[in-house]
Image (spheres, rainbow, N blue to C red):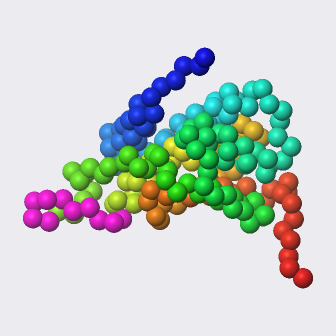
């Protein structure tokens, strides 16, 4: 039987990691903090996918690997499947989680330094809320990118949080020729 850790402990560690990189280590350089958080996620994803695919044969194509990420890998991380998977058949996939667990526990500290002051009480601007929340998505983006990289599928991963706590992860494989050709209507 494998060792397990309570989900709340993992959530707390991730929230504190993001907070530390954004406020203490790289407080004046959010782009550098984002790159470091994503790099840590990349390492985690790279190692996790190795563990989860150790006893299974290699994937025959990209779609099979993406389905594995959406069903099995996501289930191991978040105890649920991805809610929706879309593709344009030209190298872009969109994974949607309607209740992304790591965003449901995020709270924004109104005492941050980049806030507008109004009568001695800080006011959170919508832009600041999005910026702070989006910093928490660099880690899962890195996890997915690292996992796919270890499977031999390099890609770019970005996130969209237009409807919290829902999250859309965009996987862009660029001009990879291993995808089936796009079917055009006649």
Q: Where residue 135 appears, x then y in whole percent? A: 43, 50
Is 2 placed left or right of 123 in the picture? Answer: right
Indicate yes or no whether the magenta region holds residue 119. Answer: yes
Residue closest to the eye, 35 or 15: 15
User: Residue at the bottom extreme?
Assistant: 186
Whether residue 62 is visible to the viewer of this picture, yes or no, is yes
Q: Split into 4 quadrants, where in the image is the N terminus?
A: top right
Per the rendered image, the range of residues in magenta is: 118-127
On the image, the x and y values in percent for residue 7 come to 45, 33
Residue in front for this viewpoint, 83 or 29: 83
Outermost top residue: 1
Q: Is residue 25 visible?
A: no
Above or below for 177 versus 182: above
> In x, y percent, where is residue 17?
40, 37
Q: Is residue 41 left or right of residue 61?
A: left
Where is residue 2, by image quadrant? top right
Residue situated furthest left in the rendering: 119
In the rendered view, tell whether residue 89 sits above or below residue 141.
Answer: below
- Position of the C terminus by quadrant: bottom right
Marker count (numbered) = 0
Residue beneath the point at 33% across and 66% down:
126
The x and y percentages for residue 115 are 24, 59
Which of the 4 image quadrants contains residue 178?
bottom right
Side (left or right) of 35 relative to 53: left
**What residue appears at the point 65 percent right and 39 percent down from the top-left corner?**
73
Residue drawn at 30 percent across, 51 percent down = 108
Nearest the eye: 174 or 121: 121
- Please check the rendered image and state whether residue 93 is part of the magenta-colored stretch, yes or no: no
Residue ID at (21%, 51%): 111
């Amino acid at each position: 039987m494998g060792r397990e850790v309570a989900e709340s402990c993992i959530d707390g560690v991730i929230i504190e990691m993001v907070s530390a990189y954004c406020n203490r280590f790289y407080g004046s350089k959010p782009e550098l903090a984002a790159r470091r958080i994503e790099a840590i996620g990349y390492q985690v994803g790279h190692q996790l996918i190795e563990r989860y695919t150790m006893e299974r044969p290699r994937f025959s194509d990209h779609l099979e690997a993406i389905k594995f990420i959406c069903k099995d890998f996501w289930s191991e991380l978040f105890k649920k499947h991805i809610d929706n998977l879309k593709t344009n058949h030209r190298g872009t996939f969109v994974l949607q989680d309607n209740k992304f667990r790591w965003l449901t526990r995020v709270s924004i500290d109104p005492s941050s330094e980049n806030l507008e002051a109004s009568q001695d009480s800080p006011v959170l601007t919508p832009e600041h809320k999005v910026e702070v929340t989006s910093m928490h998505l660099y880690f899962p983006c890195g996890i997915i990118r690292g996992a796919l990289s270890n499977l031999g599928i390099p890609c770019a991963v970005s996130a969209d949080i237009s409807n919290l706590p829902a999250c859309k992860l965009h996987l862009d494989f660029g001009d990879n020729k291993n995808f089936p050709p796009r079917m055009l209507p006649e």
